Image (tube, grey):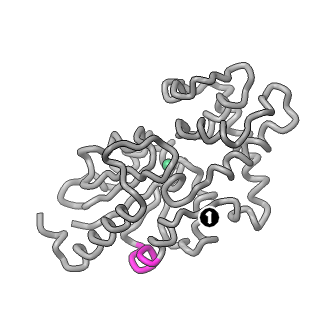
Amino acid sequence: MDLKIVLDFDGVLFNSAFEAYSVCNHTVEGDGDFREQVDFQEFLEFRAYVTDAWQYRRLYDKSVFNRHFDQLPQIAPDEHDWLFAKRFFEARKRMMENPDWPKVMSPYDFFFLLKPLMSQHPDRFHVLSTRDTKSISRTMSFYGAGEIPICGQEDIRREGSKIDVARAHGWLDDGKHLTVYVDDMNHHLEPFEGKVHLPLHADWGYDSNGDRSLSQHQVLAIIQSMLKLQANGSAKVQ
Ligand SMILES: [Mg+2]
């Protein structure tokens, strides 16, 4: 079986909360319909429930702001949310024109520890994220991991969800792939339970932690072992 290590981006490889906060502030700048007093602490509390950029409108737009952030996952997007998402990505695009833009993305230690393994085995790794592919690829290249293939927001919109993208790539095919999937959002991880060999919850990201959450060093140790097993051929034994 072929080992595939599928990694979420935000909250696993990079702490991008400050970047998203900066983009939101640029998006709503000078528009009286939006709350101006959102500080970074409140943003981080809200961020724990965010899986797509349109949801930030629910924090900033005065007409729909709801301080019960835990209700966010139950909200279905409307046309105003999609319009906000469009403005968000336009603002990010303007900010990305600055060559220094990737500097606002902060790599976790996990990224630096994993980087030599990714360089040695680029074909074993794949990024799977709800973020737009361009900003992922720009960041990965800036930090020296530009060779890792990426499935981003465009792929997820086309296929339906993260697990649908994984299915389309054959990563769920038993007997073909031995898949490790690392995500910090429980909501994204749950559909993978029982579908991939190792769905791992990253305890260093944005979501709340449970008994099965793993630290950066624990996940790294698992990935190292799996790569070693694959190299020894043991992973082929079913
Ligand atoms: Mg994440």
Q: Residue furthest right?
A: 30
Give the side of residue 216 with respect to residue 50, left or right. Answer: left
| Residue hosting label 1 | 139
Magenta segment, which residues?
Answer: 116-122
Q: Can you give x and y, in whole percent of width and height, for residue 84 in the image?
A: 70, 34
Q: Can you give x and y, in whole percent of width and height, for residue 98 in the image?
A: 79, 62
Give the side of residue 178 with respect to residue 161, left or right. Answer: left
Q: Picture quarter containing residue 160?
A: top left
Residue in view at x 50 percent, y 29 percent: 73
Give the side of residue 123 with respect to residue 129, left or right. Answer: left
Quadrant of image for the N terminus? bottom left
Q: Residue furthest top?
A: 63
Whether 80 is among the magenta residues is: no
Q: Would you place residue 81 above or below residue 93 in this image?
A: above
Residue in view at x 72 percent, y 31 percent: 60
Badge 1: residue crowd in 10 Å (few <14, some 14–19, many ≥20): many
Under mark 1, the amino acid is Thr
Labels in figure, total: 1
Give the side of residue 236 with respect to residue 24, left or right. Answer: left
